[in-house]
């Protein structure tokens, strides 16, 4: 549990946006990798008809690519997925 919510400070801008994305979880697409792991297609907030492939540990969005990976900083999509998976 602590490992899931680590890095999710309530006043954090990514976390605030993650809650907005999480509120629309009904719109997410479900996808599976070749080895059967579940991925989510999470819609971009900035661009219509753009979905990022996201799970709790990675995301295809530019924020995670440029700022997240090296800093071990989950993007808003990953945070939203973590929130969603807490409820499953
Ligand atoms: Zn992302």
Image: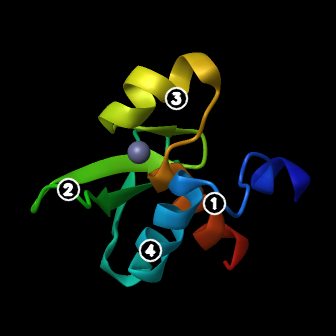
User: What residue lies at 33% left-to-right and 39% top-to-bottom?
Assistant: 61
Which of the numbered marks, if any, corresponds to residue 82?
1
Residue 12: quarter of image: bottom right
User: What residue lies at 42% left-to-right and 70% top-to-bottom?
Assistant: 21
SS at mark 4? helix
Of badges 1 and 3, nearer the viewer stands 3
SS at mark 1? helix
Mark 3: C-beta under 8 Å from nearest atom of ligand 1:
yes
Marks 2 and 4, how far apart in space?
Answer: 13 Å
Marks 3 and 2, how far apart in space?
Answer: 18 Å
Task: Read off the residue under disc 4.
Answer: 20
Q: Kindly give the residue lying farthest to the front in the view shown.
A: 11
SS at mark 2? loop
Could you tell me residue 36's position as x and y percent? 49, 48
Task: Read off the residue under disc 2.
Answer: 46
Q: Earlier in the sequence, mark 3 or mark 2?
A: 2
Of badges 4 and 1, nearer the viewer stands 4
Q: Look at the image and tell me whether residue 38 can be seen.
A: no
């Amino acid at each position: 549990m602590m490992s899931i919510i680590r890095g999710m400070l309530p006043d954090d801008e990514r976390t605030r946006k993650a809650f907005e994305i999480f509120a629309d979880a009904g719109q997410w697409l479900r996808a599976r990798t070749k080895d059967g792991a579940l991925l989510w297609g999470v819609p971009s907030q900035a661009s219509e008809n753009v979905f990022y492939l996201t799970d709790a540990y990675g995301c295809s969005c530019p924020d995670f690519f440029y700022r997240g990976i090296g800093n071990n900083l989950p993007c808003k999509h990953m945070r939203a997925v973590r929130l969603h998976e807490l409820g499953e």
